[in-house]
Image (spheres, helix red, strand yellow):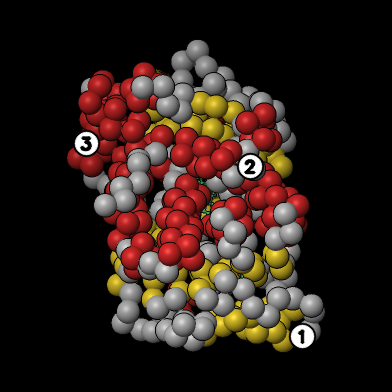
Amino acid sequence: MPNVRTQVGIVGAGPAGLVLSHLLYLRGIDSVVLENRSRQYVEERVRAGVLEQGTVDLLAEMGVGERMKKEGLVHYGIELRFLGRGHPIDFRELTGGKGITIYAQAEVLKDLNDARIATGGQVFFEVEDVSVHDFNTVQPKISYRKDGHAYELACDFIAGCDGFHGTCRPSIPHGVLTEYERVYPFGWLGILAEAPPSSEELVYCYHDHGFALLSMRTPQIGRLYLQCKPDEDIAEWSDDRIWHELQVRLASTGWKLAEGPVLQKGVTGMRSFLVDPMQYGRLFLAGDSAHIVPPTGAKGLNLAVADVQVLARGFDKFYKTGDHTLLDRYSQICLRRIWKVQRFSWWMTSMLHRFPDGTPFDQRRQIAELDYVTSSRAAATSLAENYIGLPMEWD
Ligand code: FAD
Ligand code: PHB
């Protein structure tokens, strides 16, 4: 019989929901997580791969970092490639030794689910018809169905961690949230391939045909992306066509791109989006439910983790002392950093993609920008400090 009462009801078992649930457990706060997909679906969905140092440190502190420390690939730089030449951006040198870790989102979620289950956490998968109510009172509720039965979960607070298409954000009355949005006129076609990564570092490539990205998951599995139309039909992209286009865009003298069987492929749209505030009454939005960034800066998962870190501290303070000032300032604290991350993600996207309406002037300006970033220490440092992750400012 599922719980009928909890302190924090969490909608969504993505990175935001599961990290929040475990952080609360570690602080002695009870939570219930309601997820509409199956555990297998959530753990197999191919998504993010780049973890900022702050995300890695938090997962380790939470006791869910053991496999990540063993299997994660630590990187101290990226390569920017344009006009057929690669240019390293050395994070270690530019940021005083900092780096990022490549470890798939799916693996992070497996580790978090294992930890929640091992510690008696309540995570319910395949729940239906989730809806949130009364969050403008001190006794909010979540109603849902599971295995054909209807349930109501009474909570002190609700955390809407249900992603961009979730139910929590649209449940907030019209007029409360201001939305900011930019939709890009392109998407990413991504593949997972049984091909060892052909480069030590991630390669972000600007090319006449459009952007390409070489990333990886393990020393045997590559993750690669091509800029495509936002509504690109994946059926029109045979594996051969994908590899051919990757070869053309990523070509560089003296360098070879290794190919291999394609394990998975898909198309993702690109947008920048956020709402201000990220809370209403006792409903708090966290992660993709409150904001989306284009993936060029590798920030979505990291932003989700940063939000719930602030939220967990706010709940902790409230339950320990009754003081809700940190919860009241949740949006303000998060949004100050989120806007900087939005700016960085937009900037990386604008610099590296071919815009359908781009003029020869725009293209020469993009090349000049890449030339500047790869030749000026000041500009490279700016990229590096954003990529490895900005600090949270709590004031
Ligand atoms: P989600 O992961 O979307 O989780 C929300 C959960 O809520 C889902 O499990 C969903 O099934 C569930 N849900 C939705 N509606 C309901 C409902 N009504 N009831 C119950 N449950 C519900 N980010 C990075 O940091 N680095 C990267 O390298 C990166 N690469 C990416 C590449 C791709 C191709 C994509 C698509 C994304 C990438 N991202 C990256 C973004 C990152 O994956 C997301 O930002 C991250 O998953 C956000 O986590 P979340 O928990 O907020 O939302
Ligand atoms: C990934 O490995 O999936 C990845 C890496 C860097 C990005 C986006 C996605 O900017």
In the rendered view, would you say 279 is above or below 193? below
Residue underneath mark 3: 365
For label 2, being within 8 Å of ligand 1 is answered no
Q: Amino acid at mark 1?
A: His
Residue at (32% x, 56% y) in the render: 333
Q: Mark 2: which amino acid?
A: Gly
CA distance for labels 3 and 2:
46 Å
Name the residue carrying label 2.
63
Label 2 with label 1: CB-CB less than 8 Å: no
Asked whether residue 32 appears in the rendered view, the answer is: yes
Q: Residues within 10 Å of mark 1 (few under 14, many from 20)?
A: few
Image vertical order of residue 120 relative to residue 254, above or below: below
Q: Position of residue 306 (x, y in %)?
A: 44, 50
Q: CA distance from mark 2 to mark 1?
A: 35 Å
Nearest to N terminus: mark 3 or mark 1: 1
Q: Label 3: few (<14), some or many (≥20) within 10 Å?
A: few
Q: Quickly name the residue at label 1.
A: 149
Name which quarter of the figure residue 385 lies in: top left
Q: Position of residue 88 (x, y in %)?
A: 39, 21
